[in-house]
Image: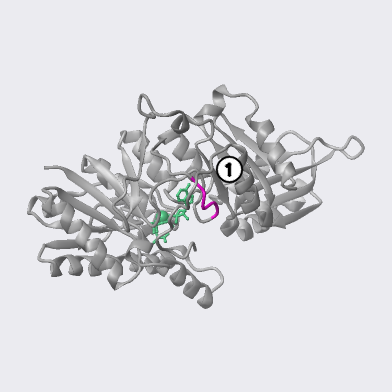
């Protein structure tokens, strides 16, 4: 008998029919002789709708209350899913994140899982029931408050539970057949990857490929837990996220570029006329860090000889743009910079692939294809297995397609997108 953790995303349980379809799949897994723990997301676009609602009440919702509101989405789906399973004649028990023992830091909206103590889940499955757990939520033991793990966090709940329960596999069910060489919504000719390494998937997830939540991949790598990403709408074998590509994988699977990710969720802040003195950059970025704001790319220009002033640009999540500009303006006098510019019309395009290490010329090919597509590069950052650029947001999808062809990743036929609104 195996222990399987399955996670179903919002588009898989978008309505009553979806819940019933998923319930049947879960029951089939149970009937095949497995113990089954299910993590479920909020139905369809519920989380977005709840956020919209909060923003209609106040421009800056309080973190604690927003988390309280958002966790309600997963409560609805977990209870309905348990009912649908019970209607098929099998016992199912639903649990909130806190009941399932998901303990987190106190950072509302972006809490990290510290520990998972799933005794109630173990008890339920040992008694023959199917356990249904609300994704994306936990509890902080000091404040006793309910927290959320950030958008897409149900993937992380699933992997963390799978690790704590020592499950045989964690299956992530979504609205596409696996991890593709690019978002199939942007590139219909994208190819499905048989395997992708933790390392590559981490870079893809960090660069905006929202098919998996970044922390879920970090978790899986730490515990060496294989993840199977597949569709809840088909029976096709999906993509395995694993430590290494299997021996004998075809050339295509060891392509130089595993995938191309794009991200529209970042904004760029430019601090104009910064005195080029030791300690200034440290002061600026410490202020940002103190507000718990994560920054991504940074560019500092050479200072103009005549003035000794320079410009510093960095990117950050749009959602934190207002707060960042406010706290920077608060230290304007102290630092002595001239002005701040805020630009939320940027897009980030990233090429990811372990093969880059041993293949020179990837950057040259990438930049040449962007130039042919008439796309101007505004910022660049690299890691050992990734190259990212910032461009205008309206050029982004054109850039993804151009890079996808330049690296010969296109396949015949269209990748199927079964559901979801792409929101
Ligand atoms: P769920 O609701 O199941 O969690 P998400 O919307 O979070 O689903 O993630 C699935 C979506 O991720 C797909 O519909 C697809 O548009 C997007 N996506 C982005 N990059 C990729 C990629 N490289 N491969 C597959 N899907 C991707
Ligand atoms: N419902 C949450 C969201 O939409 C968590 C998740 O689906 O993973 O972000
Ligand atoms: Mg998701």
Residue 87 in the image: state x and y as whole percent: 14, 70
Q: Secondary structure at mark 1?
A: helix
Q: Residue at x 65, y 51 (%)?
A: 398
Q: Residue furthest front?
A: 412
| In-image side of 291 versus 414 (left or right) | right
User: What's drawn in magenta, residue-wise?
Assistant: 186-190
Q: Is residue 48 above or below residue 245?
A: below
Q: Is residue 84 among what the camera can see?
A: yes
**Identity of the residue furthest to the top in this view:** 358
User: In the image, is 397 to the left or to the right of 111?
Assistant: right
Quadrant where the N terminus is found in the figure: top left
Residue 44 higher or lower than 153, as above or below? below
Q: Quadrant of ligand 3?
A: bottom left
Question: In the figure, residue 320 lies in which quadrant?
Answer: bottom right
Q: Residues within 10 Å of mark 1 (few under 14, many from 20)?
A: many
Where does the image place residue 376, in percent across and percent down from the top left? 75, 46
Residue 374 or residue 413, whichever sits in front:
413
Q: Position of residue 358 (x, y in %)?
A: 55, 22
- Closest to the observer, 142 or 374: 374
Can residue 287 be spotted in the picture? no
Q: Quadrant of residue 80?
A: bottom left
In percent of the image, x 37 and y 31: which residue is there? 243
Is residue 121 or residue 378 the one in the foreground? 378
The residue that label 1 is drawn on is: 404
In the image: residue 297, left or right of residue 303: left
Front in this rendered view, residue 104 or 267: 267
Q: Position of residue 24 (x, y in %)?
A: 20, 62
Is residue 60 rendered magenta in the image?
A: no
Residue ID at (50%, 72%): 52
């Amino acid at each position: 008998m195996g222990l399987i953790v399955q996670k179903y995303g919002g588009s898989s349980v978008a309505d009553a029919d979806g819940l019933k379809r998923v319930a049947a799949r879960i029951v089939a897994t149970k009937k095949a002789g497995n113990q089954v723990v299910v993590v479920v997301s909020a139905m369809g676009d519920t989380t977005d709708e709840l956020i919209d609602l909060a923003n209609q009440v106040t421009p800056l919702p309080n973190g604690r209350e927003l988390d309280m509101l958002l966790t309600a989405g997963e409560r609805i789906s977990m209870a309905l899913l348990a009912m649908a399973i019970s209607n098929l004649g099998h016992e199912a028990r639903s649990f909130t994140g806190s009941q399932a023992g998901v303990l987190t830091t106190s950072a509302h909206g972006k809490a990290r899982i510290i520990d998972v103590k799933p005794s109630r889940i173990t008890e339920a499955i040992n008694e023959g029931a199917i356990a249904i757990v609300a994704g994306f939520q936990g509890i902080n033991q000091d404040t006793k408050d309910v927290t959320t793990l950030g958008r897409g966090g149900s993937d992380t709940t699933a992997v963390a539970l799978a690790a704590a329960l020592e499950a045989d596999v964690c299956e992530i069910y979504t609205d596409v057949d696996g991890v593709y060489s690019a978002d199939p919504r942007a590139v219909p000719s994208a190819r499905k990857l048989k395997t992708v390494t933790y390392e590559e998937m981490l870079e893809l997830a960090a660069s905006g490929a929202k098919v998996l939540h970044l922390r879920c991949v970090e978790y899986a790598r730490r515990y060496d837990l294989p993840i199977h990403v597949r569709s809840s709408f088909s029976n096709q074998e999906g993509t395995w996220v694993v430590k290494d590509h299997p021996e004998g994988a075809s050339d295509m699977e060891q392509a130089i570029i595993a995938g191309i990710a794009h991200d529209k969720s970042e904004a760029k802040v430019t601090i104009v006329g910064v005195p080029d003195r030791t300690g200034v950059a440290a002061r600026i970025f410490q202020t940002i860090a103190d507000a718990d704001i994560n920054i991504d790319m940074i560019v500092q220009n050479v200072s103009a000889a005549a003035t000794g002033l320079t410009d510093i640009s960095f990117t950050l999540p749009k959602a934190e743009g207002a707060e960042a500009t406010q706290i920077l303006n608060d230290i304007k006098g102290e630092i002595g910079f001239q002005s701040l510019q805020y630009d939320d019309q940027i897009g980030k395009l990233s090429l990811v692939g372990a093969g880059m290490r041993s293949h020179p010329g990837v950057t040259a090919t990438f930049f040449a294809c962007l130039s042919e597509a008439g796309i101007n590069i505004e910022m660049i950052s690299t890691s050992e297995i990734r190259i990212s650029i910032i461009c205008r947001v309206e050029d982004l999808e054109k850039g993804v397609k151009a890079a996808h062809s330049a690296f010969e990743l296109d396949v015949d036929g269209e990748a199927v997108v079964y559901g979801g609104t792409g929101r």
